[in-house]
Amino acid sequence: MTDIKAALRAQHIETPSWAYGNSGTRFKVFAQKGVPRDPYEKLADAAQVHAYTGIAPTVALHIPWDKVDDYADLARHARELGVGIGAINSNVFQDDDYMLGSVTNPSARVRRKATDHLLECVDIMDATGSDTLKLWFSDGINYPGQDDIRARQDRLAESLAEVYDRLGEGQRFLLEYKLFEPAFYATDVPDWGTAYAHCVKLGPKAQVVVDTGHHAPGTNIEFIVAFLLREGKLGGFDFNSRFYADDDLMVGAADPFQLFRIMFEVVRGGGLDAEAGVAFMLDQCHNIEPKIPGQIRSVMNVQEATAKALLVDREALAAAQSEGDVLGANAVFMDAYNTDVRPLLAELREESGLAPDPMTAYAKSGYFEKIAAERVGGNQAGWGA
Ligand code: PSV
Ligand code: MN
């Protein structure tokens, strides 16, 4: 139990700045009270999530949504709030120029513009002290014959190589894949195999990030996790959950058992160890639920799944597996999943001087009432704004 508690104490989950802004679907973005109006206020909200959970000490930025004049000042502000800047997420999907793609666009001018943005993100890493660049490309085509699939791979490789060469000491990039959307026929980085192949070619500073919402229904995500960890190529997660496509719902809400299975492979593969360098990030939007509690709940969901994964009796499991005891092995696995870990986590928090229930503690803190009263006027931050 001491080992389990130590592992849980060391766990670090990163929240995304964009989860604190307004978000929605293409049908409607609902405004909520107290929503941040700039990146500084987003960091203040993220600091609340860390204050009550104790395990969310960094915040991912998305550029240009979090564009500021002075990034060093933003990083200083974060430190004063007790948090740090995590991954820098690039955005080459919201400019008119990118209609036919960014780094894979048939136009050399547009490709140059996109790659320059990625390089600018590395400058922001330098200024903020971030060690991770996250790359997601919306690039792809809608119609057979629209563009040359293979040439697009060449263009992608060329841009990635340029960004890779710009990375400094201790910096890396994570390449994210996604099956479809916004491209509907062929996406340029559609799956982990494509991302993996590009990363292997580039070298150790390039790794794959698994966004749990980016697969075809029924995909065995924990297999991908096990494989990438074994190869030293699992750079991190964008956690969220989904019922249909890339729903960006709270992680663990749709399928807590899947999250447990993923976390088991993480534990099994040594992915919780700091040296493994796996970044546990959330990539979610809270369209109808309040945002700060939505993030607190999500962090707790990952923590609960991790605790259950750590509880798996690995010796008993290995014994049953080597004896070919199918039902016995499955029972060991399910015993851990069916354990109520909430008392253990409450105890852990109290040992660290935190309230046992972060949701209640936050609700009672009066923070929401304060920001709802203070944050009037100005433009609320939003997904894509
Ligand atoms: C794309 O769907 C994605 O998962 C990428 O990580 C983007 O940066 C993010 O969503 C935007 O919310
Ligand atoms: Mn993502």
Image: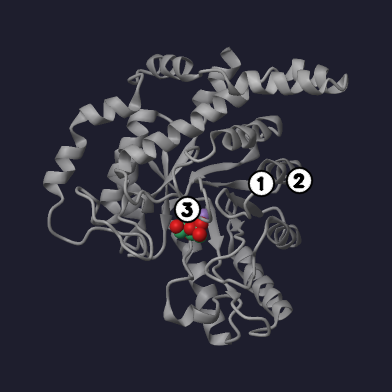
Residue found at x 68% / y 23%: 333
Q: Relative to residue 8, is residue 361 drawn left or right?
A: left
Is residue 290 shown above or below 105? above
SS class, disc 1: strand
Give the labeled residue for mark 1. Answer: 234
**Mark 2 vs mark 3, CA separation in Å:** 29 Å
Q: How many labels were placed on the picture?
A: 3
User: Disc 3 residue type?
Assistant: Asp
Q: Disc 3 or disc 1, which is closer to the eye?
A: 3
Cα distance between the residues tagged 3 and 1:
23 Å
What kind of residue is marked 2?
Glu
Nearer to the camera, 71 or 187: 187
Foreground: 331 or 225?
Answer: 331
Q: CA distance from mark 2 to mark 1?
A: 8 Å
**Mark 3: which secondary structure?**
loop
Residue nearer the viewer, 13 or 299: 299
Q: Which residue is mark 3?
A: 247
Q: Is residue 148 above or below residue 276?
A: below
Contact between marks 2 and 3 (CB within 8 A): the answer is no
The residue under label 1 is which amino acid type?
Leu
In percent of width and height, residue 145 lies at 68, 85
Can the viewer see residue 189? yes
Crowding at dot 2, Cα within 10 Å, few <14 / some 14-19 / many 20+, comes out as few
Residue assigned mark 2? 231
Q: Among all residues in the image, which is located at the extreme right?
A: 323
Badge 2 vs badge 1, beta-carbon distance below 8 Å: yes
Specify which label sits upstream in the sequence, 3 or 1: 1
Give residue 174's quadrant in the image: bottom right
Q: Quadrant of residue 225?
A: top right
Quarter of the image that includes the N terminus? top right
Q: Point out residue 41 in the picture as x, y percentages from the top left corner.
A: 26, 49
Quadrant that contains the C terminus:
bottom left
